[in-house]
Amino acid sequence: MKKRIFAALMTTVTVAGLLSGCGGNNGNETDSAVEGKVINIYSWNDEFRTRLEAIYPEVEGSSEDGTITTLKDGTEIHWIINPNQDGVYQQKLDEALLNQADAAADDKVDIFLSETDYVFKYTDADADIAMPLKDLGIDPDTDLKDQYDFTKTTASDQNGVQRGSTWQCCPGLLVYRRDIAKDVFGTDDPETVGEKVKDWDTLKETAKELKEKGYFTFSSYADTFRLYGNSIDEPWVTEGETVVKVNQNIMNWISDSKEWLDAGYFNKTVKGQFNDDWNKAMSSSSSVFAFLLPAWGIDFTLKPNWDGDDGAWGVTNPPQEYNWGGSYIHAATGTDNIEHVKDIILSLTANKDNLLKISKDYLDFTNTVSGMQEVADNDEEFASDFLGGQNPYKYFAPVAENIKMAPLSSYDQGCVELIQNSFGDYFQGNIDFDRAKENFETAIRERYPDITEIQWPE
Amino acid sequence: MKSKKPKHVQSILAHIVLIILSFLCLFFFYILIVNSTRSHGDLQKGFSAIPGTYLLENLKNVANDGSFPMFRGIVNSLIVSGCSAALCTYFSSLTAYGLYAYDFKAKKVAFTFIMAILVMPTQVTAMGFLRLVTNMGMYDSLLPLIIPSIASPAIFYFMYSYLQSSLPLSLVEAARIDGSGEFMTFNRVVLPIMKPAIAVQAIFSFVGSWNNYFVPALVIQSKEKMTVPILIATLRGADYMNFDMGKIYTMITVAIIPIIIVYLILSKYIIAGVTLGGVKE
Amino acid sequence: MKKKRKSVSYAKWGYIFILPFFVCFFIFSFIPLIDTIRYSFFEYYRSGIKEIGPNFIGLENYISLLKSDMLKYAGNTLILWVIGFVPQIVVALLLANWFTDIRLKIHGKQFFKVIIYLPNLIMASAFAMLFFAMFSTNGPINSILTSVGWIKEPIDFLGSVFGTRSLVGLMNFLMWFGNTTIMLMAAIMGISPDIFEACELDGCTSSKRFFYITLPLIRPILAYTLITSIIGGLQMFDVPQILTNGQGNPDRTSMTLIMFLNSHLKSRNYGMAGALSVYLFIVSAILCFFVYKMTNGDNGDHLKKVTKKGK
């Protein structure tokens, strides 16, 4: 017995020794003799990779585990995927970008992706992390003229220089349960329902109606946040200042949310999104009337969570135009693959045929104004069984054209996240309004040490 | 001898308490396993105590997902945890023995020092640790997850306490008289006596290292070196691409099965070892 | 090497045996620690992608931390730890005593031991995920309670201070009581059976035996358990972090010190994180010193004894 254990110990120690032997050499295998043979792409999931592999004509093949894609000219795309969870993605990306200048040519970041909530952190002109598209040889005015304007604004720095481009555009709709609509309004016709939810005042009246029949209008205050948050007229933090200014629209969201929750228009048990309660609110046993979702939200969130038959949901106009999501492609300053990067960005975000293929295969609402108009008229190919035969693009397209993007700052992600968290306690009745304000201020100062003041309207 | 008679009332009470506690412990695992046998759609309908039939499908989804190399992750975790457990129990015993059995100038200082660092939360040094590992060229390798376990103050303290209660120094002297070298004495005489402590601590450190997320998440970059917790975290990120609760439950189940197997194998040894623990004077 | 040498000093072996530990510690903990402490005196953080500092600012980080909610988070941490630890140590002592009492005739001892240790195996993060899902307002626990008829309205466990703290406590209890039981059992079984036999012959009751023989004899292991639990408590992170999504909701009442540290690390505020680390280090050192003195008062004597024997 004793011997056996000791032998086992020794074996493991030996194995450790062997490991240390190989572990050390694994660092840099890529050879840097030939310039620009490796394109490093940073992202947080496989969304971009699957789209690139599907439509980029230069793709030759990819490794089984999906970490390397080979192009026809022998160039390799190395995918560096880190989860968004806990900010890991941005952490690793920031680390790599800070070392960009010293990194060997083939280790440099060539392309990275960002989301609307933090796109400005990377497009900031002072940081100069994402290359202006012009420097790549892309002229946004001609090459990207078919893109939706707000996506171009979002990807631009404070001087209006566009530093990123997206294939995806995420206008949101109001998605409602047809059975509830029939029960309360006597009809599930999208036009009639659309009238009932056309603006916040009308919607409040409708909410009362729904409440009388025992239905919730939305699942929670987190669902409506994006609509208010998208329409702020001043950035959270003005360029060059260190003051967080809470917009009147956000205050409206706070007072409306409190009012709605207390009135029973929201389901009090649902807190936030992407959790079990939220998922359940989308199932047949729930009594939530509607959700505010973009194209991907319908296909990847609502559909898997719905356990009834197809055709139970319908879409109509939201009370206010909004955008939810979008992955921006940026060329990293210092890339050694300018031609490839340019080609990839053009092929994936400015080629109408490619974009329509993405819409067809991956159900993204893609970034081509003319293409989306065609799709909106093409009921045959794009009508959805899940939505009872409606063609959602018909509703998405006008929303997309009317979206006004709120002015961005590099503090948006934190502000948006923290204001919802701090006031969640207030809505639930755990703390009073002033305490929630205090908590928000504390949390902001923790997240952003350089913020000196938080200003509330009035 | 009248006190030797069994105590029925207390015995029944003990059993009831044990059954309640066991129920509490198993209940959560039961829910986990049941949920892993159901599809996302089923899970939406609410909780049901009866297992579903979707386990194979969920397993297939987990296994075929190229972006989450689960099998590779389990192998990595086994390597890291196995090596860590071996290194830390062996070297902690060695250190404890060194401080317990020998007399040297720095002894008291060394002991006090280890006691002082015993309380150092690992997170405290995380920032500097990452910089160091990067400078040493060990970034994105399994080594920085294994080697530091040589210095495990908490396990050292357990070993030291155990030696205090179980190793009479007369035994060491006897070995010396028999002509045993110091290193030999440690391996042949002291280690076997410490077997129960080693078994207990091997399990603890194995589990600790298996479940560790904080450090690996900082150090590991590439997919083929990821350990299980990183993969779980990747899967659980609120990302609409991975929105299959059935798959998530299955993945958690798959992640804890190997450790349960290892534990079941070692637990027998522990119980046997513990009963051998007392040293006859 | 093997030949007998009478008046030889074995001191060098002591140094050789403890060398690997100290070399390893020096490289992987000491250097990073110094690095961390050094930065605690600097203004050094990231704003977006831009790096600010490092600029030396002396004790400013320490002062602004004292003005923040740090002490409140320390209180939270203590409360969460106590809620988990007290039942844990009581139950563990009880179980360990039962398991080692031959006269109780516990059936399926092995089975129970394996079961109660099981929760310790699961990843804290995965466990917290599971609890979050199960205790959510529309989750399995509420649906079970409602169908049994104990409650009418679903309970919002995570919406109240009491509910959230209790859940964290319950999880810590479940995860660690089996571990502690096994540890204490190992200690109790390490006591020479002769002592118990002698006590038996003297006719002492089991409660007397427990308080006068078992408890004092397992004091080193109890001290160990207490110390490791305090350290663990100070480091409490995974469970409340995942359960409350890093926010310490409601009203930041379940925000622990490490969660606070984590939020500084996350915002890349190296200076502030460094200063907080130093505070944590000092607090844990003080705590440990007290516990160590309290439970291990005879250690000095013991060392002397060892020294004598070594000569």
Image (cartoon, coloured by chain):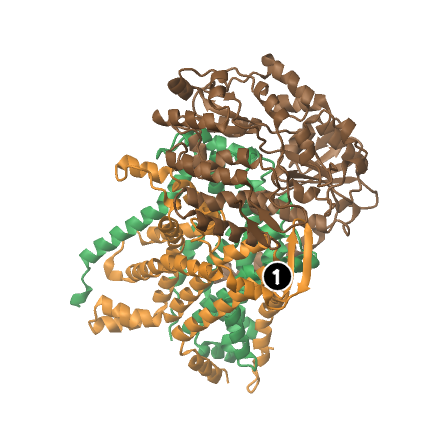
Image quarter of residue A276: top left
Residue B190 at x, y = what percent? Answer: 49, 70
Viewer-closest of A289 and A441: A441
- Image-quadrant location for residue A265: top left
Q: Chain B hue?
A: green
Rendered location of residue B38, percent (x, y): 43, 32
Q: Secondary structure at mark 1?
A: helix
Hue of chain A?
brown
Residue A348 makes an appearance in the image: yes
Task: Tell which residue pokes out farthest to the right in this image.
Answer: A34
Q: Chain letter for mark 1, please.
A: C
Q: Camera-side residue: A125 or A109?
A: A125
**Residue A61 coordinates in the image, percent (x, y):** 72, 31
Q: Which residue lies under the disc numbered 1?
A: C271
Residue at (32% x, 58% y) in the render: C91
Residue B255's x, y, as percent?
A: 50, 44
Q: Residues within 10 Å of mark 1 (few under 14, many from 20)?
A: many
Colour chain C appears in? orange
